[in-house]
Amino acid sequence: MIVGRRAITHLAALLVTSALALLAVPSLGWASSGSGGTGFGASPTTTFATAAVHLGDVTTTATDGGITLSARVSALLSHVMHFTGVVPASDAGQKVIVERFDRVQGWLRTASGVAGPDGSFSIPWHTNHIGRFAIRALLLRGSVAGLRAASNSPTVNVTVYLPAIASWYGPGSWGSTTACGNVLKPGTFGVAHRWLKCGTPVALYYGGRTIVVPVIDRGPYANHADWDLTEATAQVLHMDGVATIGAVSLPASAPTSSSAK
């Protein structure tokens, strides 16, 4: 834990000097917004370290074995995710099974529906698990034994996030060492969490953007927050102040964004 950094209020962050915004860090590939109101004290041309920021409100599609499967790549827990697609015309009226892959139990039935007369289907899933999942669609022809082979099943990847309260920190603590041994810099990507193991990859979702960053610190200790994002992480997500985000920890093998040197 960085001594005294939790006492830095967001008001103080709003008043950070413009000199801080001129700190040289590697480019993200796009500049921070110059529309004002971000509260980061950054100029419109300020950029941050390379980070794998992706659009979270897009659709992913796969086709295999004559079946097409589509789904949004992001969803929140206890919301509805729709799996849509089409099967061969010869399979119109057949049952479509949607399965998700569990690292322990393997493929588990998640939802099911029936293909319409034109072969199309739309199957809702009331999300009841968080995590990053491989999702596949199979055809059921009369019995479980009739499920189309997995090798002929289209597979897409989706992430289900847990809604959580997040804040951000950084100004006033540059050069300090975090509880996980990281030197905090303006371009450092990461999150503080009370108990997750240091280095654990965490997927974050906010404002239609997603990023995966590691746990680098302990906290937060204010604002009833569940997560404390570094300034660079909050900046690329366009998050200011305290907000509700989507967050989920991932297996340790998941890639995370780098931090500025």
Image (cartoon, rainbow, N blue to C red):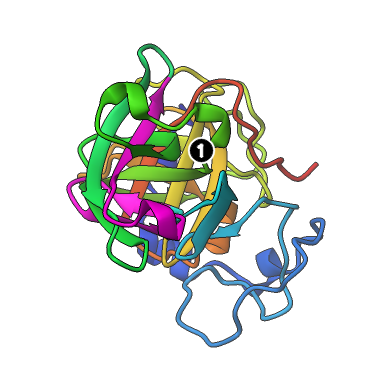
Q: Where is residue 28 in the image (x, y as percent from the top left)?
A: 74, 61
Residue at 28%, 39% in the rendered image: 226
Q: Where is residue 97 in the image (x, y as percent from the top left)?
A: 31, 39
Residue at 65%, 33% in the rendered image: 255
Q: Quick one: 71 or 198, which is closer to the camera?
A: 71
**Range drawn in magenta:** 74-102
The reply, left or right, for residue 230 in relation to residue 94 is right
Q: Say which residue label 1 marks.
A: 153
Q: Is residue 83 magenta?
A: yes
The reply, left or right, for residue 184 in relation to residue 229 is right
Q: Is residue 147 above or below residue 114?
A: above
Q: Quick one: 99 or 223, which is closer to the camera?
A: 99
Q: Is residue 6 above or below residue 42?
A: above
Q: Is residue 115 above or below residue 38?
A: above
Identify the element where label 1 is drawn.
loop
Residue at 29%, 66% in the rendered image: 117
* Total numbered labels: 1
